[in-house]
Image (cartoon, rainbow, N blue to C red):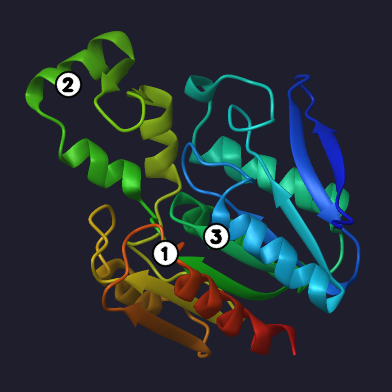
Amino acid sequence: MSIETPHHVVRADGIRLAARHSPGHGPTIVFLPGLRSDMTGDKARALVSFAEAQGQAMLRLDYSGHGESSGRFDEGSVAVWRDDAIAIINALAPGPVILVGSSMGGWIALMVAMALSGENRVRGLVGIASAPDFTRKLVARLPPIALEALKRDGRVVLPAEPDPLVLTSRAVADGEACSLLDRPIELRCPVRLLHGQRDDVVSWRTALEIAKLVTAEDCLVTLVKDGDHRLSRPRDLTLLQATLQPLLD
């Protein structure tokens, strides 16, 4: 039986950010989901089971406009969701943490680690199909008619699964301001990057690019030859746990 407790952290503007926390010894494992994903996915639930079996503290969360949190998705951006994550972590896991981020959550994990680096709280980072700077790459692939709509209306609706994706000019501007892949990524904690070579959303070469830019010497990349973007198969989840265990030890 799970020992998780639901929580809400209220932003200054009244937005309620949902999270679930399992008590245990530190460092706290913090799971950061991807774009339009939430804290109920396969990887998050597998980490909860893993943490609780070892008596490890665990925190999973939803950004504003995602999952159980309030707010509108189209009013968010990677900068907004980074700040949501930091607010929840500071409120519910004020001690040492290990960040685990999936896809966009990998980008957010890198930014959160940099923001908390001065406090020496981040004891490790695991990125799963990390997608830093994905807004820049998304805009580069837009057809001229979509670029014109974005400039004219401040938003454009893009075909996507399972639902169309609303891209706003704010999300683009914030994504550009938060870009990481054009300079060193200043981190001191151990970094582990997992990426499937059959990922058709984010190239596995992104993991190598991140590893090249991270200033931490303890940085390992694991490529899963037959892995897709989600890396949520049972053997992928086993790999995630095996990657995480030494950082906890």
Circle 2: element type: helix
Q: Residues within 10 Å of mark 1 (few under 14, many from 20)?
A: many
* SS category of the residue bearing label 1: loop
Disc on the earlier residue, 3 or 2:
3
Secondary structure beneath label 3: strand
Q: Is residue 68 left or right of residue 232?
A: right
Residue drawn at (77%, 52%) of the image: 89
Tell me the amino acid under the disc marked 1.
Answer: Leu
Give coordinates of residue 176: x percent, y percent.
37, 42
Give me the disc on residue 146.
2
Q: Position of residue 231 (x, y in %)?
A: 42, 64
Residue 190 visible to an observer of this rendering: no
- Between the C-alphas of marks 1 and 3, the distance is 12 Å
Of circles 3 and 2, the one toward us is: 3
Give the numbered dot on residue 101: 3
Residue situated in front as seen by the camera: 193 or 200: 200
View extreme (front): residue:
1
Residue furthest top in the image = 153
Picture residue at 69% right of the left edge, 29% below the top: 69
What quarter of the picture does the C terminus occupy? bottom right
Q: Earlier in the sequence, mark 1 or mark 3?
A: 3
Q: Which residue is mark 1?
A: 231
- Mark 2 and mark 3 in contact (Cβ < 8 Å)? no
Q: Amino acid at mark 3?
A: Gly
Q: Residues within 10 Å of mark 2 (few under 14, many from 20)?
A: some
Q: Earlier in the sequence, mark 2 or mark 1?
A: 2
